[in-house]
Amino acid sequence: MTAHYTSIGWNRHKRIYDAICAAGIVLFLVTFVLIGMASGSETPDPMVLLIRAFGGCTIVLLHVILVIGPLARLDERFLPLLYNRRHLGVMTFCVALLHGGLVVLYYHGFSDINPLVSLLLHSAGTGVPFELFGVVAFIVLFLMAATSHDYWLRNLSPPLWKLLHMSVYVAYLLVVLHVAFGPLQEARGVLPWLLLSAGVGVVAGLHLVAGMRESRRDGNRAIPREGREWIDCGDVDDIPMNRAKPVCIRGMERIALFRHQGGFSAVSNICAHQNGPLSEGEVIDGCITCPWHGYQYRPEDGQSPPPYTEMIETFEVRVEGRRVLVNPRPHPPGTPVAPAACPTRPEGTE
């Protein structure tokens, strides 16, 4: 963020990611329309089919977006899907825009009043305002897409930006209600209802499993030694090389305790970019690398390598015997702290 702003910093990985996403969207739309044309007893209206295709694609994309996070926490092999999730989010907004635009033009474009006013009046006149659910969800997706660039992340501040983008769950709930009280009311058979219910169940289930796993890990909180402010974080062998152990302390943010070639270093668990969990990352080329978007920090001072200037808090670490201790009092972001040396295991032991 601190080097310079560009419209979109595409690299080979992002191009492949976007190409696969775009191809998947086109494939879904084409398949939906072809199945719709082949399955109807009467020749369906092509515009109605296209409207439904864009709407169906939007809700499928929202499900994909919402399962990426918990999947990446449960299995790091899904992390590549997380790195450029914002690109997928912007694509989802574009598909929703096409869906909403066609709805307004096709169903309300020939009204004597403004099409948007006609849409809202029609929604207010129904038993359940399913169209209004869709409008509010669209506004949320628009705000998220409009602020997806790092410029807004920088100027809104990461906590506020993250709070805004957590509203994707509000948009998801509204879209589910929009579909349940709208298109599904005219659906034939139970299959559409089963598909929607299965999607909601998968999203909720994965978040619940990931949350329970996180809760169990937080339950193993480090306990201060009697009469001392240092936290006993376990045996030196509890931390794999170039990985971290999250240190959970009541009333505090987690601390990421890393083991690297220089020894043991502790930094804030919160990435300065999007508040990503650094303890779930690893040390690559001598730098702590955030698992969300690859932002890096030197373990010895919490500073990003030049030309970047992001900084995170650092903590004192010491090793007594084979126990790793951390002082929970943070140093200001970017403060150099000498790594604690890893003891050599006595000969003849395993």
Image (cartoon, rainbow, N blue to C red):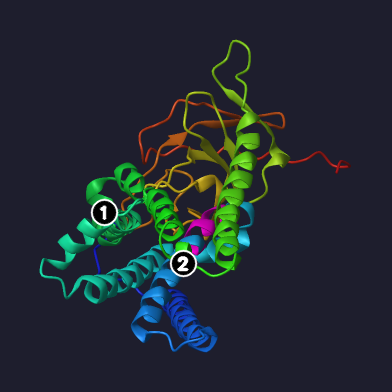
Q: Earlier in the sequence, mark 1 or mark 2?
A: 1
> Quarter of the image holding residue 107?
bottom left
Residue annotated with mark 1: 125
What residue sits 63% from the left and 12% below the top? 226
User: Can you say which quadrant of the picture contains the C terminus?
Assistant: top right
141 vs 79, nearest the viewer:
141
Residues at marks 1 and 2, CA–CA distance in whole angstroms: 18 Å
Report the amino acid beneath label 2. Glu
User: Can you say which quadrant of the picture contains the N terminus?
Assistant: bottom left
Q: Which mark is residue 222?
A: none
Residue annotated with mark 2: 186
Q: Secondary structure at mark 1?
A: loop
Residue 37 percent location from the top left of the image: 48, 87
| Left or right of 133 on screen, residue 236 | right
271 vs 187, nearest the viewer:
187
Residue 43 percent location from the top left of the image: 44, 89
What residue sits 35% from the left and 56% below the top? 130
What residue sits 56% from the left and 22% below the top? 230
Q: Which residues are magenta?
A: 64-72
Residue 316 percent location from the top left of the image: 50, 31
Q: Residue furthest right?
A: 348
120 vs 312, nearest the viewer:
120
